[in-house]
């Protein structure tokens, strides 16, 4: 078979015309029709940039193509107007919240069909027959804001599939999905693969194991898009443990519990149902607790409760005092939080200012020393999260809540944050981190909390 | 009411509002209010929301009413001392005039509700594109932003909380969370725009519309009727 579907020839790309930092340098790649290619690599290796180039969104929407060409189906994709481009390539993006401009999937599919100038009378018929073919009619009418992240990603895949493009590009579609949502998304993709063997699928990810059973080719990228490996065999990528060996825990055995739940019930409103229940849980100084549960099960809600923004019944004691009796200002002297979107918490205009009173040494140990004069908003998402953690641990808070620290990050970055935090727990810091990643949990946590039907319980780690 | 073309509706309602702002008549204001009330009732849009609008309207209209009653009593004297505000009140030399101005506020409130409660925002944008030749880029941009609002609200609340946790004091008028929200909004706008583009959207006219909105005979009938009622005070 000839290399006719996607031909990338000697591409050099950078974000700032005059900067010397190329994201991709003399990059070559050839993808055949019907392949399912997974492109792997650490953050910053240029894989998302590559996805945007293949879909023709760059350089039109950002950056400069200094050299080379990207041909999809024989034509230079950057010269194809969007309306015709969708016949060649369409894309599913990383953030499920930022892909739609209509209120529900039916509206969004109509919008896509309108763009392609389909006959308006046939639209509903096309949509319904498509939905039945892939058994997704239940998704059609529900408003997007009531869908889970996984359902939104499926909806977005539906849009890409409906357009019947030759190439479908998936840019880290599982960045924040639990296992069940990921499997459901993959099932849909596999169905497409069976019904339509000619479609080429290009997926970007930093976790290879997500794609076992569907990928036919694996490509690993290094710095500036250098191809490290390319082949049909499952590639070996470093795991958390290989980056930083897990630290053995010395949780301080006789210490008094710092945080205790006793028959706690969390309700969104007085008359509403209980959404979270914790009968008997405690956090001791030095604990590193992984908080596992599917998306939407209430992990963030628990954090918000601890931060004093949600009412609860029963008792939560922080440092011996009842939480609801402590002033919010005083809670925050003891509790810190890094949300999923760390850029929300920045208050200063440079990284150095933001990290104060941390010294440069600490910044350097997180690999941020070279960025000390940058604006926090210019950092990549992984770097932003590191900065978020730094600014919290320097506030000398004693318990740190981390909401999905793996989101939008590669293994190395997550491992490095975890390493730093585990080191701090030996000095008495406690950490609760919410995650879907069981490997991360079993490697770094000394306690595992799970949430099932709204009930939070501690799992015996020796069994798990 | 829901069937009336949204563009026609907004133009007629704006015109009506303009016309009645010159009206000194109590009874015709009442007619307008009654008309809107009945229209809302018939289209099944009467709900608690109406009260939410009427409460501030009542406050405004009561305060204007009393102000005009107290100050407007003197007739000619007021005319002489007329400042800016009294341009309005110069005609309100007795209870009836004060009542007319007060009722006008209600009439505005009802006209506004008549539009907003009976119009689907999406249909309105579609209609602006199809009847008023609004640029598709702008129109779909508005729709996308509209659908993002719940998320923007959620992120904004989280930003405020995250900053509070940092130990920074926030007053209600602090710009800090707003700044962060703006930076985020820029990112989001970029992402959504790229997602729209990858679905083949390029903002050109050459597209089909699933919802085709046209101006029909009943739109004209309604428009003429509405305007006639608003202008009736001139003749009667």
Image (cartoon, coloured by chain):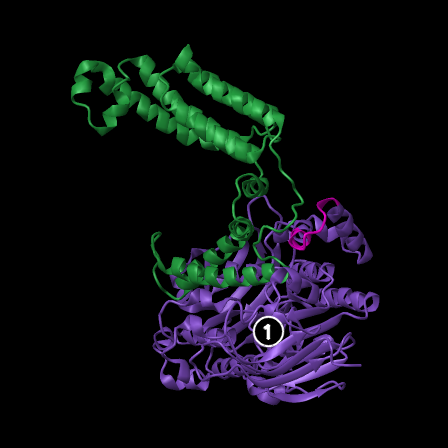
Is residue A450 at least partly visible in the picture? Answer: yes
Q: Nearer the viewer, residue A383 or B143?
A: B143
Q: Secondary structure at mark 1?
A: helix
Q: Nearer the viewer, residue A456 or B46?
A: B46
In the rendered structure, the answer to whether residue A224 lies left or right of residue A117 reads: left
- Colour chain B is painted in: green
Q: Residue at x 26, y 14 (%)?
A: B93
A71 vs B25: above or below: below
Please tell me whether residue A141 belongs to the stretch shown in magenta: no
Residue that mark 1 sits on? A53
Q: Chain of mark 1?
A: A
- Colour chain A is painted in: purple
Q: Nearer the viewer, residue B78 or A143?
A: B78
Residue A88 place in picture, x, y as percent = 69, 67
Quadrant including the C terminus of chain A: bottom right
Provide the residue span drawn in magenta.
A111-121
Residue A1 place in picture, x, y as percent = 80, 81
């Amino acid at each position: 078979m000839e290399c006719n579907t996607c031909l990338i020839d000697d591409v050099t790309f950078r974000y700032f015309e005059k900067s010397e930092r190329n994201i991709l340098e003399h990059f070559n790649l050839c993808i055949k029709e019907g392949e399912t290619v997974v492109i792997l690599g650490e953050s910053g290796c240029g894989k998302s940039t590559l996805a945007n180039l293949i879909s023709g969104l760059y350089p039109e929407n950002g950056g400069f193509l200094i050299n080379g060409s990207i041909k999809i189906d024989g034509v230079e994709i950057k010269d194809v107007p969007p309306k015709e481009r969708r016949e060649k390539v369409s894309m599913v993006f990383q953030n499920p919240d930022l892909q739609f401009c209509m209120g529900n999937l039916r509206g969004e599919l109509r919008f896509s069909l309108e763009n392609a100038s389909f006959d308006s009378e046939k639209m509903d018929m096309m949509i319904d027959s498509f939905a039945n073919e892939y058994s997704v009619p239940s998704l059609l009418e529900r408003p997007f804001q009531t869908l889970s992240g996984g359902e939104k990603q499926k909806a977005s895949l539906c849009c890409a599939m409906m357009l019947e493009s030759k190439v479908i590009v998936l840019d880290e579609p599982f960045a924040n999905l639990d296992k069940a949502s990921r499997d459901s998304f993959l099932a849909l993709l596999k169905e497409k693969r069976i019904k339509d063997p000619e479609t080429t699928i290009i997926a970007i990810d930093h976790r290879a194991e997500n794609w076992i059973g569907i990928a036919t080719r694996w490509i690993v990228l290094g710095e500036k898009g250098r191809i490290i490996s390319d082949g049909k065999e499952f590639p070996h990528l470093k795991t958390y443990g290989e980056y930083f060996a897990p630290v053995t825990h010395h949780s301080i055995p006789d210490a008094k519990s710092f945080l205790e739940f006793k028959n706690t019930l969390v309700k969104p409103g007085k008359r509403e149902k209980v959404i979270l229940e914790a009968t008997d849980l405690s956090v001791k100084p030095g604990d590193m607790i992984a908080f596992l549960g599917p998306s939407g099960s209430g992990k963030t809600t628990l954090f918000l409760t601890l931060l004093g923004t949600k009412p609860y019944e029963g008792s939560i004691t922080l440092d011996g005092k009842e939480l609801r009796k402590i002033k919010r200002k005083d809670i925050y002297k003891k509790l810190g939080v890094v949300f999923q979107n760390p850029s929300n918490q920045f208050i200063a205009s440079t990284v150095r200012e933001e990290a104060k009173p941390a010294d440069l040494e600490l910044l350097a140990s997180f690999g941020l020393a070279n960025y000390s004069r940058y604006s926090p908003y210019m950092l990549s998402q992984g770097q932003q999260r590191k900065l978020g953690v730094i600014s919290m641990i320097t506030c000398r808070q004693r318990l740190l809540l981390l909401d999905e620290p793996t989101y939008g990050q590669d293994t190395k970055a997550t491992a490095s944050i975890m390493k730093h935090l585990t080191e701090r727990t030996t000095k008495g810091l406690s950490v609760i981190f919410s995650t879907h990643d069981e490997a991360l949990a079993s490697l770094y946590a000394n306690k595992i909390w799970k949430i099932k039907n709204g009930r939070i319980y501690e799992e015996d780690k020796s069994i798990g | 009411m829901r069937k009336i073309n949204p563009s026609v509706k907004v133009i007629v309602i704006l015109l009506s509002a303009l016309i009645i702002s010159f009206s000194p008549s109590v009874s015709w204001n009442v007619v307008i209010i009654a008309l809107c009330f009945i229209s809302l009732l018939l289209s099944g849009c009467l709900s608690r929301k109406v009260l939410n609008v009427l409460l501030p309207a009542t406050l405004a209209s009561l305060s204007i009413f009393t102000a005009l009653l107290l100050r407007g009593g003197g007739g000619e004297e007021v005319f002489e001392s007329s400042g800016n505000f009294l341009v309005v009140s110069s005609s309100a030399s007795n209870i009836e005039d004060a009542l007319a101005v007060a009722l006008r506020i209600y009439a505005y409130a009802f006209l506004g509700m008549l539009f907003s409660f009976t119009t689907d925002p999406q249909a309105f944008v579609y209609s602006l594109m199809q009847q008023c030749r609004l640029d598709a880029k702008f129109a779909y941009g508005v729709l996308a932003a509209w659908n993002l609002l719940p998320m923007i609200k959620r992120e904004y609340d989280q930003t405020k909380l995250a900053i509070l946790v940092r130990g920074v004091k926030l007053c209600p008028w602090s710009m800090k969370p707003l700044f962060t929200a703006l930076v985020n909004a820029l990112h989001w706008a970029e992402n959504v725009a790229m997602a729209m583009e990858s679905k083949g959207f390029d903002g050109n006219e050459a597209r089909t519309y699933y919802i085709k909105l046209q101006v029909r005979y009943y739109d004209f009938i309604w428009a003429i009727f509405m305007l006639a009622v608003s202008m009736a005070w001139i003749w009667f």
